[in-house]
Image (cartoon, rainbow, N blue to C red):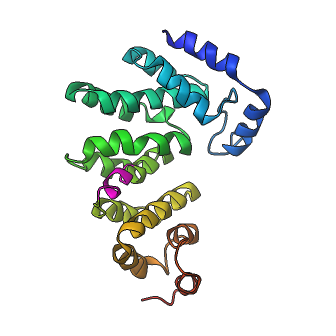
Amino acid sequence: MKAAEIIGRLEAMGAPERARVSRSFFKTGPGQYGEGDLFVGLTVPQVRALAKEVHPLPHSEVVRLLHSPLHEARLLALLLLIRAYAKGEEAARERIFTQYLKNTRYINNWDLVDCSAEHIVGAHLLERDRAPLHALSVSALLWERRISILSTFHFIKRGEFGETLWIAERLLRDPADLMHKAVGWMLREVGKRDLEAEETFLKKHCRTMPRTMLRYAIERFPEELRQRYLRGEVR
């Protein structure tokens, strides 16, 4: 199949009311983080089902989908890249990783980052030099910074927390609320597996880190302990 044919199917499957809700939910208004993004109005399960149907797709056609102005087409492209990476040989995985990082301007909303970064960037760098993550963490592009911390979810799930904590420390002064939420989420995931590691980080930074980041990080703590962290009383 060609990308143009698949986009036609996405458009035919779309629901205008759902598209309207998506435009609001993903902040597509002037000056918002998703400004100008276009939706046809599909659910994630619908897009996942289509990805399963059209896989495997030639890499060139996947890239065309990734370059589409339609949000659901870009989501579909990323789901196809994830499937291709998981099933691919080493050369194919290297190509997918490289193409992913070359096209981050199209991975331009939190759902697109969150569904893909750990499975491609995190998976690729598990046994490799982490320098690409460090470069992404200081990028001027919000979505590249989010990729840097969300990629470490792959490491967290395998009991490795050092990279997450290292990047989290460098993102403590990030100006974007979406980054505060992402870092707090990853700190919470560390804590699910190693509470001592999370608390060591929080005891050092809870009095100066962004409030949203702290709230996300301590969301599952007992209420009394949560309040002590929010008051900065834990040392």
Above or below, 192 relative to 67 = below
Q: Which residues are magenta?
A: 151-158
Task: Point out residue 45 in the picture as x, y percentages from the top left corner.
Answer: 59, 34
| Residue 87 drawn in magenta | no
Q: Horizontally, is 180 left or right of 93 in the view? A: right
Could one spot residue 65 in this view of the protein?
yes
Residue depicted at x 57% and y 10%: 5
Q: Is residue 126 above or below residue 87?
A: below
Say which quadrant the C terminus sits in.
Answer: bottom left
39 left or right, relative to 150: right
Q: Nearer the viewer, residue 32 or 60?
A: 60
Can residue 137 be seen by looking at this rendering?
Answer: no
Residue at 34% over, 55% down? 157
Q: Which image quadrant for residue 132?
A: top left
Residue 19, given in percent of the width and then of the height, sits at: 73, 32
Instruction: Say which of 147 and 220 sits in front.
Output: 220
Count of labels in the image: 0
Residue at the image point whose x is 57% and y is 87% from the top? 224
Residue 208 drawn above or below residue 170? below
- The image quarter containing residue 58 is top left
On screen, residue 214 versus residue 135, left or right, reads right
Q: Is residue 155 magenta?
A: yes
Residue 161: x percent and y percent? 31, 63
Residue 20, x across and y down, in percent: 77, 35
Q: Residue at x 64, y 34 (%)?
A: 43
